Image: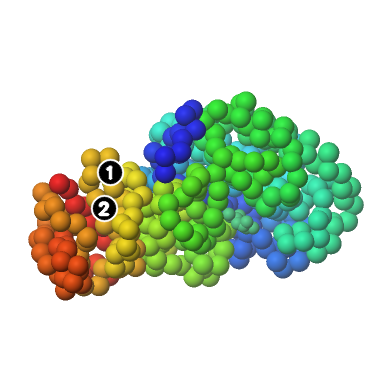
Amino acid sequence: MKYRFNDKRDWFFQERFGLFVHWGIYAVEGWHEQLQWRQSIPKAEYVKLKDRFNPTLFNPDEWLDLCEEAGITYLCITAKHHDGFCMWDTKATDYNIMNTPYRQDVLKMLSDACHRRGFRIGFYYSCPDWHQPNSLNFGRHHSLPQPNPGDQPDLLKYIDFVQQQVTELCTNYGTISEFFWDIPQEMNFPQLNETIRRLQPECLINDRGYGPGDYSTPERHIPEGGSFTKPTEACDSVGRCSWGYRRNEDYYLPVAIMRKMDAILSRGGNYLLNVGPKPDGAIPAEAAAILRSIGKWYKTVREAYTAEPFAFEQPVWNATFTRAADGTLYVHFPSGLLATGFELPLDTPPKSVTLLNNGQILQANVELMPSHALQNKQDLHITGIAPEKLLDTVPIIKISW
Ligand code: GLC
């Protein structure tokens, strides 16, 4: 992972764990952020949700306290999702947060708190828009089954609208660190990314917009292969079914998230973990508990991810590796460590071997193991692990010479 931008966007390679936030008027129903499309709700009906959106418990500091506990340093929140509802005080449409009973610019409140407390903030912005009358209905996935009554599709007018909104988002909220377009419309409008670049030099732009971006965005899966060859931010959610708040969500076990997170971080990618706040503005207790468990683990093993991805010539049993410039090796067990010891193809006795998860010092011996005896090669045999204590975590072992 030796690539760098060599400019202000390089924060991305230091700050590796972000919070994705899907929050909008869909939270009122607590079903899915694409409720309007997936349940074919007519626009005239759907818009009424905004009259019920009143997040009186929204407290950006509570969100950030949770981020601190999780070890998260940047956030990316839905400014506008596919439903077209805008979570800020936009002048481009009335369909926005100022016209809910809440009447406060939540993006402003959140970005102010982030800047005050040293968190980075970025915005998610959907290319499809199921509300703006000029937006085009392409008749494919993520398009409403029929255009809305009264629509006046006009691509250039829609792009002007997007341009106006991008300018607002990049002007009125201080430093913006990430711009997350979604659902590419396979069209090139370079002026949009140019506007972001001109107004926000620290901002990385993803690859789902109207032109080439800075980083790729694998979603809810681990790409095949080894170390990433371009800047990557994988996104995933604490729950299986939805990104927005879902009353009946199927939440993942924290260890399931740790496994995916380890796979991404150890290959040089960033991890953006999503929560869907409730309509009252609070992060669901289940999601908060998951973030806290992840944080306890992440803070003990984090140093392993500042090292570069590494691989031995031959794969080693269940393990992946990162290695620091001084040779310190981190052995990751993303699918668990289910024995009391393991061996590595190394023959220099280390100075120390530590299980990062709990600080336990492990035994290490260079010895002839059955596996490589025929080649007459010694291995580094690490022992003394208590695997029964590691079932709910991703163990990482640090070896220093
Ligand atoms: C998908 C979904 C969308 C979600 C996004 C997160 O593109 O359409 O609802 O916001 O993934 O990456």
Q: Disc 1 and disc 2: Cα gap in Å?
A: 8 Å
Q: Is residue 8 above or below residue 397?
A: above
- Residue 324 position, x and y percent, is 28, 43
The residue indicated by pointer 2 is 330
Which residue shows up at 62% across the image and 26% down it? Answer: 198
- Left or right: residue 61 versus residue 399 is right
Give me the residue at 17% from left, 48% from top: 400
Mark 2: amino acid: Tyr
Viewer-nearest residue: 372 or 93: 372
Q: Quadrant of residue 79?
A: top right
Q: Quadrant of residue 123?
A: top right
Q: Which mark is residue 141?
A: none
Percent coordinates x, y for residue 31 in the rendering: 61, 66
Q: Amino acid at mark 1?
A: Ala
Mark 1 and mark 2 residues within 8 Å of each other at the beta carbon = yes
Q: Nearer the viewer, residue 345 or 248?
A: 345
Q: Residues within 10 Å of mark 1 (few under 14, many from 20)?
A: some
Q: Judge whether 225 appears above or below 18 on screen.
A: below
The residue that disc 1 covers is 324
| Rendered position, 161 above or below 274 | above
Residue in the picture at 56% in, 40% down = 214
Q: Nearer the viewer, residue 203 or 292?
A: 203
Q: In the rendered image of this protein, does residue 310 appear above or below residue 220? A: above
Q: Residues within 10 Å of mark 2 (few under 14, many from 20)?
A: many
Q: In this orientation, does residue 237 appear?
A: no
* Residue at image point 66% right, 30% down: 194
